[in-house]
Amino acid sequence: MGADKGAGLIELENVAYSYGGGELLSDISLQLQPGSFHFLTGPSGAGKTTLLKLCYGALLPTAGDVRLFGTDVRGMERDDIALSRRRIGVVHQDCQFLDHLSVSENIALPLMVSGRDLLAEAANLKELTNWVGLTSRAEARPPELSGGERQRAALARAVIMSPDVVLADEPTGNVDWEMSQRLLRLLVELNRMGKTIMIATHDLALIRAAKAHVQARVLRISNRHLQLAGADL
Amino acid sequence: MTIDIAKLSELVVGDTQADRVVPPTGFTARLTLFSAAAMAFLAVFALALSLATGRLAARWGDELARSSTIRISAPEGQLAAQTDAALKLLETTRGVASARALDADEQRALLEPWFGPDLPVDSLPIPQLIEVIEDNEGFDPQGLRLRLSAEVPGAVLDDHTRWRRPLAEAAGRLRLLGWVSLLLIGGATAAMITLAANAALAANAQVITVLRLVGARDVYIARAFVRRFTLRALGGAAVGMVLGCAAILLLPSAQTEGGFLTGLGFQGWHWIWPLIIPPLAAAVAFAATRAAAIRTLKDMP
């Protein structure tokens, strides 16, 4: 499911993942190359979220190899994995915000934990908040946001460190069609800036809409294995 | 052991951005503050007990070891002669710095606590007491007893060993008890702060997950908790220490009649000792929270 070994930013080679005695993913090989755009689809419970977690080191494979930026995750210290996550922006379906911080502070969280000076990054933060259309909501708390606003804030947080890769798990799961198109446009725009994108979704209409704007590979998890989706998509 | 000033100042001054990422937890904050204050208060008393018993043991050891008493019981008419003979014998005894017979007023003062102020000492057959002060080398009590039995038959030497030893031992044990109490207080403080830190870490599991997701290193997450608990312990212990010292100041001052209990407190430069309690509590909190945080974080993805 990719090119030469070592060419991808994130590489999975013959990866299997078992949980609770059963194998959830089997013999998965995948390369996310710079600037590529991937959709990951499959039925609920197929293992899309698990595969994404393997891609950013939140889970370790039970068999096979996962390489983040050329380094095998098994050989990485916890801190190394943390540092590699600064190069991977993740958008969760449930967004995962810190509710005691404002939207603006949540977006700036990756900057805070990496020790960046927020004052120096203020213009960047403002521009990004504006890009996702949340300028007027910057001082609100996450629970005060609508589903679409939360997803856009999560996307802004995922890209504020200018990561090489953006992984999004059902980013349009809780929003209406119009908002999902808006989010898609943002992700396509990021891809045009050279970012590698992988979106896990079961929304086939979203995938079809995206294919009009971007050359995307569509991967499907079926019966524990990863395969290229057919021409119907 | 070297102290990294930069790291120490970083811990005290902190990172206001990093402090914001962990939400304030009122319950554990109050628990830590109260525990640290209570333990520091108790630690002041344990310290005062240790130091006071140390002084007491030293005083008893010094004063009693350097003085002895000769009691002369003789029929009326021989008492003065035997007293003179004993004094002359003591003048030639090696290790005796000075010796003097107590006068009637001094003997009355010694008996007054038991018999009252109107005791007719002159008309009672009370033995004559001789106070013997040793020099640095000290005398040989067995040799002196033999000479006294030969030359002053009514004389009995009491070198205080009989009752000095158990008193000194009791004081030593009390001092040890004080230090053991301090150790227990330190251990209990560490245990309570560990529990509070664990509660805070468990309550903030979601926060930690989010921080890990956005690339926070374990040391960053741990520091946010460690700094908070260390400063709380420092503040709480400072309050407890001040209250403990105030309570010590309110105790009756040392008096001869009051004996040991009125001497419980700090004297002179010993007042510096309580100042060590808050930084020590902070160090205990630092170590306990850091260990708890690192242990918890290792179990998280």
Image: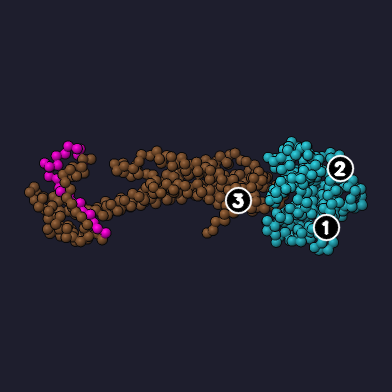
Chain colours: A cyan, B brown
Q: Are marks 2 and 3 on the same chain?
A: no
Label 3 CA crowd tier, 10 Å (few <14, some 14–19, many 20+): few
Q: Are marks 2 and 3 in contact (CB under 8 Å)?
A: no
Residue A145 seen in this snapshot: yes
* A31 over B242 or under it: above or below: below
Instruction: Identify the element where label 3 is drawn.
Output: helix
Residue A170 higher or lower than B87, as above or below: above
Viewer-proximal residue among B73 and B13: B13
Q: Which residue is mark 2?
A: A181
Name the residue carrying label 3: B10
Which residue occupies 40% across, 40% down? B249
**Residue occupying the point 86% across, 39% down:** A178
Counting from the top left corner in percent of width and height, residue B2 is at 54, 58
A193 or B26, nearer to the observer: A193
Q: The residue marked by circle 3 belongs to what chain?
A: B
Q: Chain of mark 2?
A: A
Q: CA distance from mark 2 to mark 3?
A: 46 Å
Q: Amino acid at mark 3?
A: Glu
Q: Which of the chains bears the disc numbered 1?
A: A
- Spatial CA span between label 3 and label 1: 41 Å
Query: Which residue appears at 45% of the width and 46% of the height?
Result: B274
Sequence-wise, the earlier of marks 1 and 2 is 1
Give, as a three-letter code, the residue at label 2. Answer: Gln
What percent of the width, then of the height, locates residue B207?
Answer: 67, 45
Residue assigned mark 1: A33
> Are callouts 3 and 1 both on one chain?
no
Q: Residues within 10 Å of mark 1 (few under 14, many from 20)?
A: many
Q: CA distance from mark 1 to mark 2?
A: 24 Å
Extent of the magenta region? B114-136
